[in-house]
Amino acid sequence: MEKSRVRWSDLPPQLWPLIGKRLDNYIDIVRYRSVCRSWRASLPQLNAISLLSPLRLPHPADHRFEDVLVIRRIIYAISPLHHHQISTSPSASRASEGWLAKIETTKLGKMRFLSPLCTDWVKSKNRVFQKEVNLLDFRIHEVAKSYILRSTIGGIVLINKVVIFPDSAWIDVKKNSIIVAVRVDGKLGFTKFGDNNWTLIGNPNFQFDDLIVYKGEIYTVNRQGTVFLIDSSMKLVQISPELGIFSNQKHLVECGGEIYVVDRFLESKKNPELIYFFGESLPSVVDFKVVKLEQEIRGRSRWVEVKNLGNQAFVLGHNCFSVSAADFEGFKENCIYFSDELNSDLGYGFSTHVFDLQERTIVQAPAQIFRAPPIWLR
C-alpha cells in the first residue's frame, strides 16, 4: 500500500508551538509562518521582538546615558533551489550556485542588503530593487551574525565587538539579555537594560581582541592569546594556555565545531591606495598564523598550529566565520579573506585581500566575491 502523505498544515495543533519554539533565526521563522494561516497565527512575527527599539544605555567611556540602537547584521548563504534557474551551462561550476549576502534589519518589517563583504549598501537603479524577493524560492542558511551599537543621534558607540547573550528570537533583549562588548581600548565589559554603567570583566590591564558565542556560551581572547569562557556570573574562566605569540590582533573563528585563533601581523608600509584615501600610510597586513585549541587528557588544552584549512576559507572582519570555499563563487580553499582595516566589517573593496596559507602570499581578493547575489540584481 502506498504511504499517504500528511501535509504540514494537518499536523496536530499541539505540535505547532513545539516546532516553532525550536526555531531561532529569521529565515526559519519565515518558512514556518508560510505553511498556512493557522501556523502563521501560532507564532509572533520575528519583527515583533526585534532588537531595534532604542535602549537607554550608559556610554562606555563615561556615565552619561544615550539612546542606542542594537543593529543586527546576518550573513546568509543563498543558492537557487534549482541550478537551472541561474545557469543552464553544463560547464558551470558548482561554485557558481552560492552567494554570500549580508542583510541588516533597519526598522520593523524592513531590511536592506549590504555588499557581501563590506559595509556599503547595495545600490542600483535596476527596477528589480523596487520589487520583493521571495526568499522561499531559494535555499538559505545563516552563516554568521553580528551586532553593532549605534547612537540614535548618529555615530557608533566606542566599541569594537558586541555579542548579545542569550541570543534568541524568543527572548526580549530589554528584559533578559546581556550586552557584552570589547571597547576600543581593549577593555572587556557588559551591561544590560536598566544598568547605570558598564561593568568591566577580568583584569583591566588585559587587552582583549575578540568575542564569540560558541556552543551557547561566550568566549573571548586577549592579546596574549589566552582564551577565556565568560560564565553565568560574568567571570572569566581560563580554558587555554597563553599562546605566547604577540601579534597585532587576534581573531576567534569557529570552524567544524572547534575554536581557532588567527593572529594578524602588521607592518608599516607605504601603500599608495591607503595614502590616497587616508592621507597617510597605514599599517598593512604582512602575515597570519592559525592555531587550534585541542583538548588533552585530564581536561587540559594545548595550541596546535594549523597550516592547512582543507576546503575551508576564513573570513575576518567585524564578524569572523568560516565557509566551504567550493560553495561560493570566487572563494579559494585554505585561504583567509580580510581587510587591512582592523576593526572594519571587511572594510572597503580596495583594502580587501586574500592570504593563501600554503603559498604564504597576499593578493587582492577577486572582484566577484563583492557582487550582490544575482537574485536581486538580474
Image (cartoon, grey):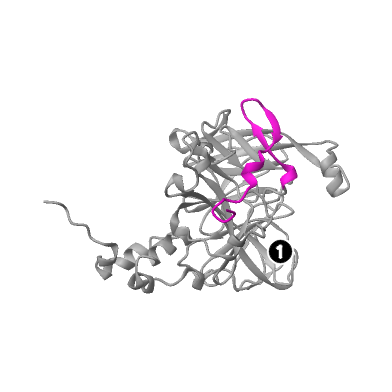
* Classed neighbour count for the residue bearing mark 1: other residues with Cα under 10 Å, few (<14), some (14–19), many (≥20): many
Which three-letter amino acid code belongs to the residue tagged 1?
Answer: Pro
Residue 289 pos. (x, y %): 64, 33
* Residue 338 can be seen in this image: yes
- Residue 132 falls left or right of residue 64: left
Q: Residue furthest right?
A: 279
Relative to 375, residue 310 above or below: above
- The quadrant in which residue 336 appears is top right
Residue at the image position 67 percent from the left and 27 percent from the top? 360
> Which sits in the foreground, 2 or 312?
2
Relative to 95, residue 50 above or below: below
Residue at the image position 47 percent from the left and 33 percent from the top? 296
The magenta-colored residue range is 349-378
Relative to 284, residue 76 above or below: below
Residue 204 pos. (x, y %): 70, 53
**Residue identified by numbered label 1:** 60
Residue 46 pos. (x, y %): 48, 68
